[in-house]
Amino acid sequence: MLEIRNLHARIGDREILRGIDLVVKPGEVHAIMGPNGSGKSTLSYILAGKDDYEVTEGDILFNGESILEMEPNERATAGLFLAFQYPIEIPGVASMTFLRAALNAKRKANGEAEITTPEFMRVVKEASAKLNISPDMLKRPVNVGFSGGEKKRNEVLQMALLEPKVAILDETDSGLDIDALKVVAEGVNALRSPDRAFVVITHYQRLLDHIVPDIVHVLSAGRIVQTGGKELAFDLEKNGYAAYVSDAA
Amino acid sequence: MTDMVSPTPLRTPAEDTLLRRFPAEKAALPGNDTVRSLRDEAFAGFAAAGLPHRRVEAWKYTDLRANVRAIAPAAPAADIARVGALPSAVPGDNARRLVVANGRFVPELSDVAELPAGVTVGSLADALASGDPLVLGALSKVPQAEENVAVQLNAAFMTDGVVILVADGLSLDRPIEIAHIADGETAVSTHVRNVVIAGAGANLTVIETIESVFRAAHQSNIVTDIVVGDEAHVDHIRLQLEPDDALSLTAVTATIGAKARFETFNAVLGAGLARAQVFARFAGREAVGGFRGATLLSGRRHADTTLVLTHDAEACESRELYKAVIDDEAKSVFQGRINVPAHAQKTDARMMTASLLLSEGAEANAKPELEIFADDVQCGHGATCGALDDDLLFYMLARGIPKAEAEKMLILAYLGEAIDEVENEAVRETLIHRVEDWLARRVAG
């Protein structure tokens, strides 16, 4: 479903990713853990298509096709979703307008008609209730005045509405207290299905208690230096990243 | 060092035309002796200085001398059928529409039947002919308006316009729309003067539109003098929808009474060269004023918004917010001046201007000026200028929204801060549709 081959990337003169290989199959949940500065967020941005980075070598295949030349919106409508570590506030753009534009963009790309107003209201109401998102929150401009937890829940709401094939969660646990973390994790777990894959990027093992991964990778200095089952996350929590950092250096 | 002899500047063809036209036309222009001397005096102001140019500080960024090559002939009477066929530019505003075509008030196209008691709508030409002291007393009696060359040219050449008088305490539930329409297959020039006098405690909304039947390089000079009585509330909105190669000089003057409220919003959506001026004076204490506008520019268009606001009484509050979106090689100018003399204690004035540049070649000039002599005041100003935020765009793209649509949403949001302050819903919707049209044309290239 998602295949990353020998991916090298840099920003300016600084090489951040130094040969990443990763294969994600439908239904799988992969966790990518690693110390600060290992390239976790860079990887998520490159997957989503942010143009601040230059891919110097390797490829990213999504459903067998390279997406490197695709615009971010084309990747999104093809079924790739990035839940941002720091969701952006968009003053003046109403949340509902934004959600509707995103939904319609996907429908248009799939050759479907625009969503009707009653249908749109219904799906938003359903999905937001599951995430404890009040109608008042959705009356505000996108993420403006939202707490950290509200912003993360809003990311999961967008994911639920857009029904991606692959979702990348970039430090979705950061800034969340334990209750908010549970709500977010439940939202994600509700979307797990045999056709959908997740790549969960996190610094801490805590999130993985709630979103249990099938495979855990350790990213250090731009490379995946270790891959294992979910027990690898516990080792990391106990022993830290020190062993991997020195290995990579 | 010897004294430099400043050379007598050569007259430009445009200046020559104006100097020739005034003596030839003035006898036919409406007005009694008082008006005739007012015209002579105003024209003398222009004749002495000529068209303003970049070495005149107030016109530094908008050089009329260099940019106005020729003066179009005075507009002949309009074709009433053609003008009458033009629908209101603000659909759904439920307004009483008054039509001023080619500089003349056209009662037969205007909704003047069954005016509520206490409302008078008439022609400025009639008021000038009879020398109506109320109307003459309202003509640009605001600091820096009378000595402004564009206003002087208007005073010299004004042919007609509408006069609206609203009695004390009267509240109008329907807005009044003044539709300024230029009718000519080739360029014509018009000088229109409107006077709006709201009595104490009166309440009304005035919507002005500036349009044309044909897309010719018309030249219009439209001044609207507004007197807001004590405790009155006047909402003024103007939509400038001139053809892209038109020359548009507009001015609003406002005298605002005690505890009154005055709001003006100007949308500059047309003209190749536009100078939209506002001259306002708080004449009574505890009045509130809102001065806002939105400018959309593309191609090589040039638009200048110049505001001179004088807090001439204690404890008045003013808010100024002007936003511009500038594409291609277009150029925007904002000059905002707030005068606070020593006696205007407790003044609260906040001026903000922002420019959004959509291309490398776009240009924005902002010149906020505060002149404060009172010591117990709150005055502030800010000016920003920048491009669309890449992080916002990326976030929207990452949700599948195509770039053009994301930009459109962000530009609408950016202008929304100013547009949302317009109380009249029909005007707000018209504005949003006009912005969307402009953005759609931009995308279509």
Image: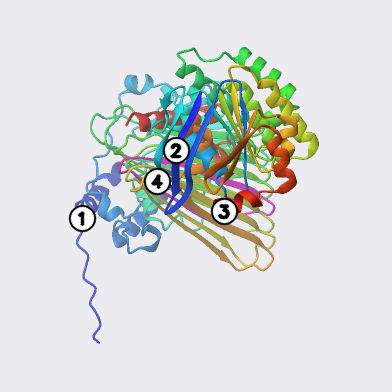
Q: Are marks 2 and 4 in contact (CB under 8 Å)?
A: no
Q: CA distance from mark 3 to mark 2?
A: 55 Å
For disc 1, the chain is B
Q: Magenta span covers which residues?
A: B282-308
Image quadrant assignment for residue A165: top right
Q: Residue at x 24, y 73 (%)?
A: B6
- Location of mark 3 (residue): B351
Locate residue A18, reporting x and y percent. Answer: 47, 45
Q: Residue at x 75, y 29 (%)?
A: A183
Q: Is residue A68 left or right of residue B283?
A: left
Q: Is residue B127 visible in the rendered structure shown here?
A: no
Mark 3 burial class by Cα count in 10 Å: few <14, some 14-19, many 20+: many
* Callout 1 and callout 2 share a chain: no
Q: Are marks 3 and 1 in contact (CB under 8 Å)?
A: no
> What secondary structure is marked by label 2?
strand
- Location of mark 1 (residue): B12
- Location of mark 4 (residue): B32
